[in-house]
Image: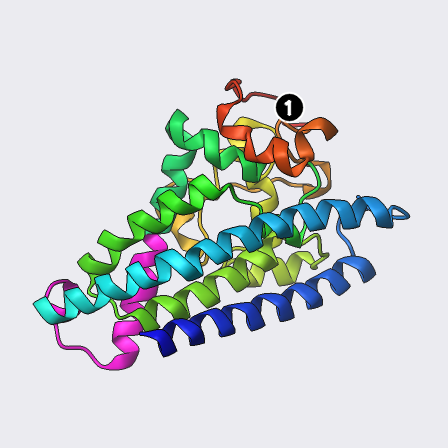
Amino acid sequence: MDATLQDFARWRAISTLTLLAVLLAWESLLPFFAFFRGKLRERLRHGSINLLLGATNSLMIGFVFAAIWWSAAKWAEAKGVGLLNWVAMPTWARLAVTFLLVDMWLYWWHRVNHRVPFFWRFHRTHHSDPDMDVTTASRFHLGEIAISSLLRVPVIILIGAQLWEVVLYELCMFAVVQLHHANVFLSDRTDRFLRGIIVTPYMHKVHHSRCQPETDSNYSSLFSFWDRLFGSFRLRDDPHTIEFGLDDLSSRDNQTFAAIMATPVKPLQRRQGNIR
């Protein structure tokens, strides 16, 4: 177990930091929005807070939940529980099923986070960022990550997935999450091609809109086709007109680390707004 968990932590760190560096450079050279043009100190402050949240979450996953996932996967394998333990499949097919089922679960879990007020209290930490960039991919409340990670246990058991399959999915999923949060420019043609399979920056910008009909759309994490399949796909003709954040939480006072951690206890405000 120790070697597997160490490999998971090492490869997650390597892939996350490598792609983070690439996307930060891309955002600097070819940004979609000019949030931080001439504002290096503000950009560093914004990014450091988001990455501190991400580091805190990663430590909790690495030291607590990765071991729980491993135990769940080994228990399911020993007891012959779960789809992949009931049906003999080649390795590639097992991996494909794991990717599809875990990703579909994440789609519905994300949707629940928008629909159930208790979960939205935590998830709005992610949506309260008024300047979405690649560091926003790491901006999740510790409470949301804990709940999500705990709920991953029955998913692993029901699928019968092995830990390495879940780890590989996590690595691929978070790489795509970093990309679609990044403040990078892609041509319409490139974005259209990519979103036939994965969630893209143009697609996810709509999800971070201040306008609730747009916020409550495009819930997919890795594969984009879940939104088309379940009727939640949405685009805006001109993504440059999108405003990010939440009206009640996007002020500078709400962007400190302490204020972000206190988000779940702040009053809920009905999200609304017209698409400009």
- Marks counted in the figure total 1
Residue drawn at (38%, 51%) of the image: 226
Residue nearest the observer in this picture, 167 or 210? 167
Q: Quadrant of the N terminus?
A: bottom left
Q: Quadrant of the C terminus?
A: top right
Q: State whether residue 261 is above or below residue 58.
A: above
Q: Looking at the picture, how far across and down is residue 181, in whole percent?
A: 61, 51
Q: Is residue 156 magenta?
A: no
Q: Is residue 202 visible?
A: no
At label 1, the amino acid type is: Asp
Residue drawn at (63%, 26%) of the image: 249
Residue drawn at (36%, 36%) of the image: 112
Residue drawn at (52%, 33%) of the image: 124
Q: Is residue 94 magenta?
A: yes
Q: State whether residue 204 is above or below residue 99.
A: above
User: Which stretch did the figure color magenta?
Assistant: 80-104
Q: Looking at the picture, how far across and down is residue 270, in whole percent?
A: 51, 18
- The residue to which callout 1 is attached is 247
Residue 243 found in image quarter: top right
| Image-based side of 269 in relation to 223, left or right | right
